[in-house]
Structures are given as structure tokens and as C-alpha cells.
Amino acid sequence: MSVNFPLFLMVATAVAGLLWLLDIWLLKPKRLLAVAAFNAELSSNARTKAQSQSSPETELAVEKLLKEPVVIEYAISFFPVLLIVLVLRSFLAEPFQIPTGSMIPTLKVGDFILVNKYSYGIRLPAFGTKIIDVGMPETGDVMVFIPPHKDEYFIKRVVGLPGDKIIYKGKKLTVNGVEQKQIFKAQIPFNSPEYKVIEETLGDTTHMIHTVNRGFAKTQEWIVPAGHYFMMGDNRDLSSDSRYWGTVPEDNIVGQAFAVWMHKEPGFNLPSFSYNKWIE
């Protein structure tokens, strides 16, 4: 299982915040009392109060008494940063990197994308429980989610909403009896074609998909259960999706992918910003 970074971030923020509060309520008052006692003792022993409080040795001693423990110092320094990152990632936008080619040609391996965390409702960080309704996924959306068979993030396109009847036949989609429009665009490579580039329209969304130039899978049919979504990759013949592991429950939704902001080829390669685009 991959590391649950949202949970780690939430715990780290909570621990840092609690340590800061501990310092405010308990430790700092004790340090101030220690400084007051030190000054009182120093004043009673010194010839004058002015002399006792103006020496470099006295200032150094007071500074040492006021200094936070190392753990508290780090907690105070990191808490604001952790809190800002937690809020941004949980409720606004979260970055992801594309690890596989299942969404080619829409998304390439090495693309860094931004995911809108509030388009499908405000959810509690780490737990994913929806607390405020904002909107629902629509056919054609590119969505990040946790699949039912594996505890890690996946990204696919929504092709079926709750209650929809999905038929996949001859590498074409039919939704509720309506065959989704496909327009042939190209075969690649030109001299020895291995796959086709096809323009597909799902609902109000038009995008490109890839299909390989071999084989036709048997006709498959599904009825999308209530509260679930049917997901497919744009690289249709090279995608592990709802055709194989089932539909995605609403509680597993992470957010809607809306932009590519950077691309980096695997290995020791510099990042590029020439592939930046809005995701359709």
C-alpha cells in the first residue's frame, strides 16, 4: 500500500499545532515565571536594579530562560506552513504526477496535473467524507479517485453515471442506448500503424482516445449502481479500469483533474512547461 500522504500531513499539522498550544498554555508561562524569579533574585543581590538588568551576562541568561525547547521551536516554525499546505491540498487544489500511460493521449507519463478538490464537494482531509455538497461528476470528466481494489490514486475518465447502462462493443461506447460519437483522426506510426487516434464525444466533452489495431473484445454490458461511477482510460486497450475491477463509489472520489502544469520525462531529465494545458 502506498503512503497515505494526506493522513500524514493532517497528523503532522495536528501534532505541531498541539505542541504550539502546549507551549502557549503551559510551558511559556513557566519560562516567564523563571525569568521573573531570576530577575528578583538578581535585584536582591545586585547593588542597583539598573546594574543587574543591563549587563550582557544577564541578557544572555534571560534569553536562555525564555528559549523554547527544540521540539517546540520546530513545531512553531512548521505549523503555519503545514496548515497552509493542508488547506490548499484538502480544499482547493492538489498536485499529482501521472505514472502510467492509461490516459494517453490526454495525459502522458510524467505529466504533473492539478486536481480541483471542491468541484465534487468539500471533503474531510484524509478520510474523504463529504461535508458540503458542491457538484457531482459529469460524463466526460477526468477524475482522480481510489479504486475499489487498490488503496492508491487512479485517474480515468467518467463514462457512466449512477443508473446508466453501459455497452462496450467493437471498441465503441453506448450509454443508455446512445452510441457515443467517434471520428477517426489518424493511424500511428504512418508506415506501420499500431494504433488509431480517434476523436470521441462523451456528453458535452470532446477528447482524443487511442485504440490498438488488433483484436475486438467481446461485447460487455454494465448497469452502474447508485452512488457509483464507471471509469475508463483514454488509452482504451491499455487501461486497467472499471471494465476489469468494477465501479467507483462516491466516497472514493478525490477530485476533478483540470490542468497540466508541468511535464518531466522519467529519469534524469529537466522538467518542461511546453506541454501545459487545460484538461478536456
Image (cartoon, rainbow, N blue to C red):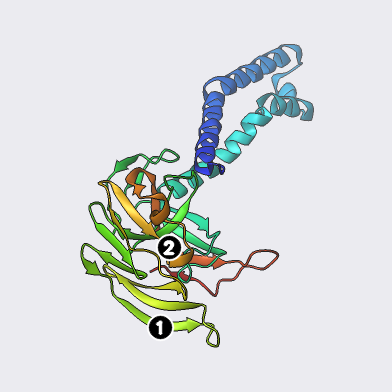
Question: Residue at left 55%, top 65%?
Answer: 109
- Element on which disc 1 rests: strand
- 104 lies above or below 253: below
> In the rendering, which numbered label is found on residue 185?
1
- 261 lies above or below 64: below
Q: Position of residue 89 (x, y in %)?
A: 46, 49
Is the residue marked by circle 1 packed among few (<14), some (14-19), or many (20+) residues within 10 Å? few
Front in this rendered view, residue 242 or 62? 242
Front in this rendered view, residue 66 or 229? 229
Q: Quadrant of residue 99?
A: bottom right
Q: Position of residue 175 (x, y in %)?
A: 25, 63
Q: Is residue 278 visible?
A: yes
Q: Quadrant of residue 242?
A: bottom left
Question: Residue at left 35%, top 51%?
Answer: 118
Front in this rendered view, residue 243 or 46? 243
Is the residue marked by circle 2 packed among few (<14), some (14-19), or many (20+) residues within 10 Å? many
Mark 2 lies on residue? 233
Which amino acid does the dot numbered 1 rest on? Lys
Q: Position of residue 85 (x, y in %)?
A: 50, 47
Which amino acid does the dot numbered 2 rest on? Gly
Residue 149 vs residue 50: left or right? left
Question: Residue at left 27%, top 69%?
Answer: 204
> In the rendering, which numbered label is found on residue 163?
none
- 14 lies above or below 268: above
Quarter of the image with the C terminus in it: bottom left
Q: Quadrant of residue 211?
A: bottom left
Q: Position of residue 260 (x, y in %)?
A: 48, 66
Which comes sooner in the sequence, label 2 or label 1?
1
Residue 32 vs residue 144: left or right? right
